[in-house]
Each structure stands twice: as C-alpha cells, then as structure tokens.
Image (cartoon, rainbow, N blue to C red):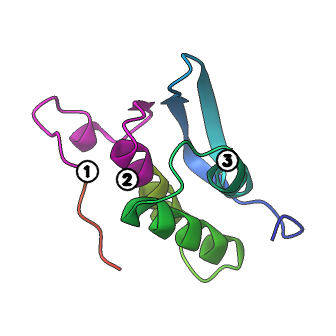
Amino acid sequence: ISMLADIFFSTPLHVHLSNGLSRTFDSVNDTLDFLENEWPLRHGERYKRACKKCRAALLRHTPVAIAREAFVAACLEAGLPIQGLPPRWQRSECSAPPRMSA
C-alpha cells in the first residue's frame, strides 16, 4: 500500500507517545505505517478499525476524514493524548471516544 500516492489530513494530529515524545501525523501513509510498525498495543477494536480505514482511504474507498477519525479513536483507546482534534472532542467532560459507524 505504501506505493500508492499519499493522502494528507486537512488538520495534522499531534500525538503524545508513552515514551514522552510527541509525533505529528499529517498523512494516511504515515499514520498507517505507525499503526503497523510502532503502535504500542497490537489489539483493540479501534486499532483494527483504524488500520482498515487507513488502508481503505489509500485505495480511495473511504474518505480521508473517516481514516483520521478512526486513528483518533485508536489513540484514545490506547491512552495516547492527542492535539489537533475538532473543538467538540476537546471538551474535558468528554472522556469517551466519539461514536463512529462502521
């Protein structure tokens, strides 16, 4: 899949990793590479969905916004803090990841 043209997010995501570093994700290829090779937890429904949606976005079968949202949900599931989220997800009272349809 890495041979396909990359697709960029409209707003990059800044993820704070468990090792204290932070990383910026601005494209589907970079995000999928991270999920497949560096992800701290290789399980979880949102992790699996994020991998699936990123692959589908690269094949132009899924909108890039859906792949981005799936990655955000996977980060929340793994306890990785994120910046660059839409304002409605940044409210402190919102502790659960956003609901997404299949």
Q: Position of residue 61 (x, y in %)?
A: 60, 83
Callout 2 environment at 10 Å: few (<14), some (14 to 19), or many (20+)? many
Please tell me which residue lies in front, 99 or 18: 18
First in sequence: mark 2 vs mark 3 = 3
Is 83 positioned to the left or the right of 96 in the image? right
Q: Is residue 48 left or right of residue 91?
A: right
| Whether residue 5 is situated above or below residue 11 in the rendered picture | below
Q: Which mark is residue 73?
A: 2
Q: Foreground: 20 or 7?
A: 20
Residues 97 and 9: in front is 97
Q: Amino acid at mark 1?
A: Pro
Task: Kindly report the distance in space between the C-alpha atoms of the residues bearing marks 2 and 3.
Answer: 15 Å
Which amino acid type is shown beneath numbered disc 2?
Ala
Residue 73: x, y in percent? 37, 53
Residue sticking out furthest to the top: 20
- On whether residue 66 falls in the magenta region, the answer is no
Residue drawn at the location 40% of the way across and 30% of the way down: 81
The dot on residue 97 is 1
Q: Amino acid at mark 3?
A: Phe
| Magenta-colored span | 72-97
- First reached walking from the N terminus: tag 3 or tag 1: 3
Most extreme residue toward the right is 3
Indicate which disc, 2 or 1, sits on the residue closer to the N terminus.
2
Q: Residues within 10 Å of mark 3 (few under 14, many from 20)?
A: some
If the image is split into quadrants, where does the N terminus sit?
Answer: bottom right
Q: Is residue 75 left or right of residue 14?
A: left
* Extreme residue in the left direction: 93
Is the C-beta separation of discs 3 and 1 under 8 Å?
no
Name the residue beneath numbered marker 3. Answer: 34
